[in-house]
Image (cartoon, grey):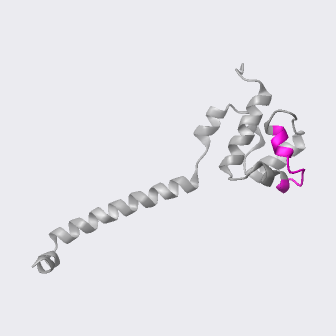
Amino acid sequence: MCMSKPLETVFRENLRFYRQKAKLSQEKLSALLDKNINYITIIESGKSLPPITMIEQIAEILRVEPKCFFDPLEKNEKKFFDKEAFIAQAKEQIAKSAEEVLQTLLQTSPISAIISS
């Protein structure tokens, strides 16, 4: 399989993608790795690449498989499930449905005749 982007670029883009999805700053991830505050900044900017053992540690913190850093970003975007966004959207849909049900019940129940008179 031929890649259109250099593997280093794919790695950096995926690292940034998964770090942001985990809602971690570059500094926070660096601290969790017990590295200099700019460690992840240096990696994401392309000035350095981490050793394999560090990639494994980063993957563990971000809760992804290390191989995910090397898949094209488009594949990762399709695979990633944003739990918080899903819950927020579900809550909104449930609230809207509940409101519609209540409106229907109020319009069709004998109580609505008593309330409106």
Which percent across, then down, holds residue 57? 84, 49
Expressed as whole percent of the image width and height from the top left, the position of residue 1 reads: 71, 20
In the image, residue 41 lies in the stretch drawn in magenta: yes
**Location of residue 108 with respect to 117 vertically, above or below:** above
Image quadrant where residue 4 sits: top right
Q: Nearer the viewer, residue 16 or 97?
A: 16
Image side of residue 31 versus residue 70, left or right: right
Identity of the residue drawn at 70% across and 45% down: 18
In the drawing, does residue 43 fall left or right of residue 68? right
Q: Position of residue 100 (x, y in %)?
A: 28, 62
Choose between 26 and 88: the one closer to the eye.
26
Can you say which quadrant of the picture contains the C terminus? bottom left
* Residue 72 shown in magenta: no
| 12 lies above or below 22 | above
Q: Residue at x 45, y 61 (%)?
A: 91
Please state the extent of the stretch shown in magenta in the rendering: 31-43
Taking the spot 66% from the left edge, 48% from the top edge, the residue there is 21
Q: Is residue 117 above or below residue 78?
A: below
Please give the name of the residue rendered at 78% of the width and 42% of the height, measured from the top-left corner: 66
The image shows residue 96 at horizontal and vertical percentages of 35, 60
Q: Is residue 87 above or below residue 72?
A: below
